[in-house]
Image: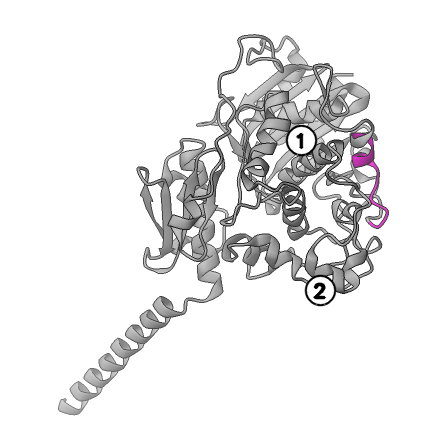
Amino acid sequence: MRVVGKILKWLLGLIVVAVVGVAIWLWTAPPALIRIAANYTAKIVCSNVFLADRDAQQVLAVDVQAPGHPILKLMMLDVDKDAGTVSAGLLGVFGKGAAVLRPGLGCANVPDGNVTVAKAISTDVSVSPAVPDVLWPEGGRVEPSQNPEVNKILDDTSLTGPGMRAVVVAQNGRIVGERYGDGFSEKTPLLGWSMTKSVNAAIVGTLVKEGKLAITDQGLFPDWKADKRAAITLADMMAMSSGLEFNEDYGDVTDVTRMLYQEPDMSAFASAKPLTGEPGKAYSYSSGTAVMLSRLWQNTFTDPKQALAWPQLKLFAPIGMTSAIMETDEHGTFVGSSYLYATARDWARFGQFLLQDGIWNGQEILPPGFVAWMREPAPASDGVYTRGQLWIEAPGNEHAPGATAKAGVPADAYWLEGHDGQTVAVIPSQKLVIVRLGLTPFKLGYRPQNLAAALAKALK
């Protein structure tokens, strides 16, 4: 028995040593996956708490843990509303990540932990949330839908999809129907994820109108001028055809997750990538490209604060997107790939703005013909993507030209698309805009083109 006791003590000692060793390892050198998970958790919770006024623990459970990687279920939070910060870590201790609120700019990850420096980036410009009491889109008033067929479609959960948080349907410049999920309303800012790319493309258009950028520009970053990347044009970047290396796979440690959740300067990370294809001839969807586009248009200003104010002053305020907040990285570059929060009605305003060819209340916000150019098929994309960060094909049809029209959606439709079920469909032939937002992972098999087809048929 003494021998057995000694063996048990020895084994217990080994276990203790192993546990301590693992804890020291996780504390001093946490794997990249844990750091990415912690920063992702902190960022999503921060934005939803401070921009959408949601409960932190609910966001953690519903938005972060339920649909995500298993490691996210081990994340724990620390929210300081007074300081405007959120931190998260494995069991609340290991691989800690942080996000910080910056008024007017939403939340930013702080991968290097320097919250004080991160908070120093700010903007003095914000759009008043007050909305006039007149009919949408000029104001916030919406008349109840009088179309029973539209109401029937919007009440059909098989068409609006699992996890639906908002649907807004606008035709001829008026909202003709809307629905909201439990806990969400017309006042809730919702994350567009990659729909932000399309908005960022429009912001590029505002700089083209000012003469600060041209789609033929080359030698876009100083480091590129000494090698073959000098040949990349702004038009190549807009069409996701730069030829640059970038791994867009989610759910693990890849270029896109490293950029979003480990890099204080996202544009520097993306612009350091080498060429793997010929510029203009190699289509590759890349969030890194969209962030670089933000940096490029921001670089046209000598005063960084002017750049930070530009989206509000030159796009959001003029078209009445009073809820819109576009977020930056730690260094102040707009995350033009992923981080725009806006209400469903404001997402519909942006769709209406595109439908009106970049004109709002008679004012040209974008250059004449720019939206038409944005809609042209990207030559290298095989007919699924456009020159201006829009989709010709709806989710699930990205590699099947013509499939969306075959599903009953008018052939002239184009789309803004984002992660986990965010879409805006614009159908010019019917003067129709359909916004569908939610938390709907792709694996659930939901396809918004069925909703769009049903509404297009009902509203002919």
Looking at the rendered structure, the kind of residue marked 2 is: Pro
For image coordinates 65% across by 14% down, the residue present is 176
Looking at the image, residue 225 lies above or below residue 202: below
Q: Which residue is mark 1?
A: 424
Label located before the other in sequence (2 or 1): 2
For mark 2, does the 10 Å Cα neighbourhood hold few (<14), some (14 to 19), or many (20 or more) residues?
some
Lateral position of residue 343 relative to residue 228, left or right: left
Provide residue 434's location: percent of width, then percent of height.
67, 25
Provide residue 453's location: percent of width, then percent of height.
74, 27
Labelled disc at residue 274: 2
In the rendered image, residue 197 lying in the magenta stretch gets the answer no
Mark 1, secondary structure of its residue:
strand
**Residue furthest bottom in the image:** 3
Provide residue 40's location: percent of width, then percent of height.
47, 50
Observer-nearest residue: 271 or 172? 271
Lateral position of residue 263 relative to residue 212, left or right: left
For mark 1, does the 10 Å Cα neighbourhood hold few (<14), some (14 to 19), or many (20 or more) residues?
many
Magenta range: 371-380
Looking at the image, residue 8 lies above or below residue 79: below
Q: Quadrant of residue 335?
A: top right
Query: Residues under labels 2 and 1: Cα distance?
Result: 33 Å
Q: Where does the C terminus fall, quadrant-wise? A: top right
Q: Is residue 145 visible?
A: yes
Which colouring convention does the figure follow? one colour
